[in-house]
Amino acid sequence: MIEKERMTEHVMDIIRIDSLSKKEKDVALRLQKDMEELGAECFYDDAGEKVGGNVGNLIVKLEGNKPGAPPFFLSAHMDTVAPGEGIKPRVLDGIIRSDGTTILGSDDKSGVAVIVETIRAIKENGVPHGDIEIAFTICEEIGLLGSKHIDMSQLRARQGIVLDSSTPDRLVLRCPSAEKVEFAVHGLEAHAGLCPENGISAIQIASEAISNMRLGRIDDITTANIGIIGGGIATNIIPNRVKVVGEARSHDEEILRAQVDHMRSCFHNAVSRYQVTIHDDLSPEGKTHVAKLDEYIERSYDRMDVDIKSRPVTLVDTAVKNLGYDIKHHTSGGGCDANYFNKFGIECANLGTGMYELHTVNEYLVLEEFYRSAEIVLEAIRLNTVLPA
Ligand SMILES: [Zn+2]
């Protein structure tokens, strides 16, 4: 029922439409057209206004043809990371790649195309289905902002599938909680050659803090990273300010809190060790300056942990079995829109679509897995009308 050639052409088409985060409008309009041609109702929520993007989440509703089946939810994100403009996809030996100068954008155009092909196949073949609600989201790549701000009052479905992970050999059930951590160290400016003893180097303090920090893989379920550092003006000035931005993730809230506290105390300890007393004409008895710290900790998203006995997992597992494939339940180290959907009461697992080496110019899409993902979703939707609610 899945038309492989059409699916390949469609994904290439939408990959060619630029859609960096906050600039998803062109691809949204194309998808709106695709879905309206299939008789679905389309509208946008106000998430775009809330996050400063040029379009909101595209919400699509397709009325069921089988009364009694519970409504089902599908989602994939429309935005892509940089470098992602002017992408030139090419197919070779069953694999789609970019020309090597950009990402491919199969993350997550492949998920979008799986959903569109599934709906096409349903319509063409008269597959029985309940109401289907789709969210093509914005700004997933910059902190799950589309799903975070989705207008839940528009959605009735309480179970579904997100298409936004690597391989359809795996169904992602668990994703971590994440915290963003930001530290600004304030030192004291001074001429580096004439009077370095009158300065406090913010860069030195920050590097001391970071060198004492446990980073990378903390344990099986916890990771931490310092990803951005910036500060200083010139080589002959003791730098008075540096900003450091990082994150921590864990599947366990207590371990996450401990890791964030550890990162904070590394900075507090380093900052507390630095002060200078300057004697000059204005203050002959000496004026003491101490280093200072500003910190900003923000929850990025909450963990998800989908019950293996839940309906979406049963539907996918049964679909995979019916089709003669295999699938394993998976714990991921990354967050996705499903983190928010689960939090908001739509129980959903994340199925892979065949995309690899994401967020690099080597990104590629394995077509056999891409097609398989659509077959699984199609069968899961059919089963949703058969399995007792
Ligand atoms: Zn993605």
Image (spheres, helix red, strand yellow):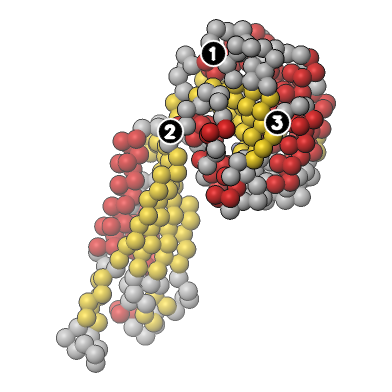
Write the residue at 80% across / 18% down.
124
How far, Cα to Cα, is label 1 from label 2?
A: 21 Å
Instruction: Classify mark 2: residues with Cα within 10 Å, few (<14), some (14-19) or many (20+).
Output: many
- Point out the image quarter for the N terminus: top right
In percent of the image, x 73 and y 13: which residue is there?
Answer: 127
- 16 in relation to 125, above or below: below
Please name which of the two marks, 2 or 3, marks the residue nearer to the observer: 3
Residue type marked 1: Thr
The x, y position of residue 237, in whole percent, is: 42, 78
Mark 1 or mark 3: whose residue is earlier in sequence: 3
Q: Circle 1 sits on which residue?
A: 314
User: Which secondary structure, mark 1?
Assistant: helix
User: Does label 1 or label 2 sit earlier along the sequence?
Assistant: 2
Q: Mark 2 highlights which residue?
A: 303
Q: Residue shown at 67%/37% (left/top)?
A: 43
| Dot 1 and dot 2 residues touching (CB under 8 Å) | no
Mark 1 is surrounded, within 10 Å at the Cα level, by few (under 14), some (14 to 19) or many (20 or more) other residues, namely some
View extreme (bottom): residue? 281
Question: Residue 268's image quarter?
Answer: bottom left
Residue labelled with disc 3:
41
Please report the residue visible at 46 percent of the width from the left and 59 percent of the height from the top.
Answer: 229
Q: Position of residue 365 (x, y in %)?
A: 71, 33
Up the image or down, 182 lies above or below 77; here it is below
How far apart marks 1 and 3 lie (CA) works out to 28 Å
Sequence-first disc among 2 and 3: 3
Type of residue at label 2? Arg
Residue 238 image offset from top left, x and y in percent: 39, 75
Judged by depth in the image, the label closer to the viewer, 1 or 3, is 3
